[in-house]
Amino acid sequence: MKIIIMGCGRLGAHLARRLDREGHDVTVIDRMSDSFARLGSDFQGTMVLGIGIDEDVMRRAGIETADAFIAVSNGDNTNAMAAEIAKLVFKVPRVVARLYDPVREETYHTLGLMETICPTVMASDQVREIILGNGRK
Amino acid sequence: MYIIIVGGGKIGYYLAKTLLPDEHEILIIEKDKRRGDIITADLGGIVLRGDGTDSIVMEEAGMARADLAVAVTGDDEDNLMICQMAKKKFGVKRTIARINNPKNERIFKLLGIDNTVSVTDLILAQIEREIPAQSLVHLLTLREAGVSFIEAKVPAGSPVIGKALRSLGVPDDCVIPLIIRNGKGIVPYGETQLEIGDEVVAVTTIVKEDVLERILSGALLK
């Protein structure tokens, strides 16, 4: 599968290495070249330097033939906009955006354009689960 | 009207200052304390400090009862988020977004944000108007209606000099309602002859623009 990941922070880099090891064709976009160091020396995929909401940068990353686009930069708004461009302009079949703000996440989830994940809600659910100990050790 | 302006930079600030005397209720949402203090010192307590793309701040601002949300921060992704949240989450009927990168105008349209203002585009249009090398200048484009207002200057040596408008073969979908000659406006008729330095203003359908450009530049005259 051809996968583009926007944002090479902890999550972006982790995901990129994992999918790369599993044999997928991975391209990572980030606006700072230093971030690519997180990918490690054995990363086989492609690195593209640039702003992830710029159509030309997305094209350079090969978005026109991508099967999936994952927006995991550190900005909710950048992720939402990049994911919307991927879906509406480039018609990428699978689009996922990380949004930290639960309300923003809910709103974008309701719009139905993209898959959204909210680490705040996920972590909150898990912490609650742990301290209330409902069946989890 | 209750107007929420997100972004207290120069544009947000002067916008508020201009709108306040018209009895509108204005609120500026601004992240930076220093910026907020400057505005408060001049315009009074109309500033809410916070991240205007954050839903909690939007709620605090009373976004749900706003008649108009104006997003004028320096970041397009923030302006997009503000308008989309205002529309989809808070049900605000009208939103206006500032666009910094002209390439994003099309994307904003696709995403349902119809009212956009691109400062870069406005300045570009002004530059086109000032530089005579460009034979055709866009004055105004009504994309929905498929019509544009253009201006062409008649340069020295142009084959159209001395020709009557009637003889140029202007297509049906174009009209020439105005010629500016030596700084004065003339409403021309078919027999009006073009002179050096004339600025010809035309209204045309967008599809006929190219033809009109070739006619006015004299390329179609022999």
Image (cartoon, rainbow, N blue to C red):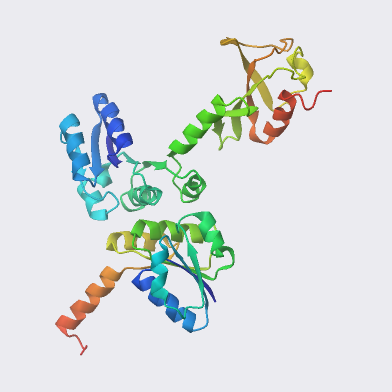
Q: Position of residue B198 (x, y in %)?
A: 65, 15
**Left or right of residue B220, residue A60 in this image:** left
Asked whether, in this view, residue A80 is left or right of residue B23, the answer is right
Q: Nearer the viewer, residue B133 or A93?
A: B133
Q: Residue furthest right?
A: B222
Q: Is residue B8 in sight in this rendering? A: yes
* Image position of A105 (left or right of B150): left
Taking B214 as reference, is B62 left or right?
A: left
Q: Is residue A97 above or below residue B208?
A: below
Q: Quadrant of the C terminus of chain B?
A: top right
Coordinates of residue A91 in the picture (x, y in percent): 55, 62
The part of the image, by quadrant, that contains residue B1 is: top left
Seen at 36% across and 42% down, the residue is: B93
Q: Which residue is nearer to you in this view: B22 or A120? A: A120
**Residue A115: quadrant of the picture:** bottom left
Provide residue B176's location: percent of width, then percent of height.
Answer: 66, 19
Nearer to us in this view, B214 or B86: B214
Q: Is residue B1 visible?
A: no
Give percent across and percent down for residue B3.
28, 37
Q: Report the number of numbered marks.
A: 0
Q: On the image, which quarter does residue B34 sit in?
A: top left
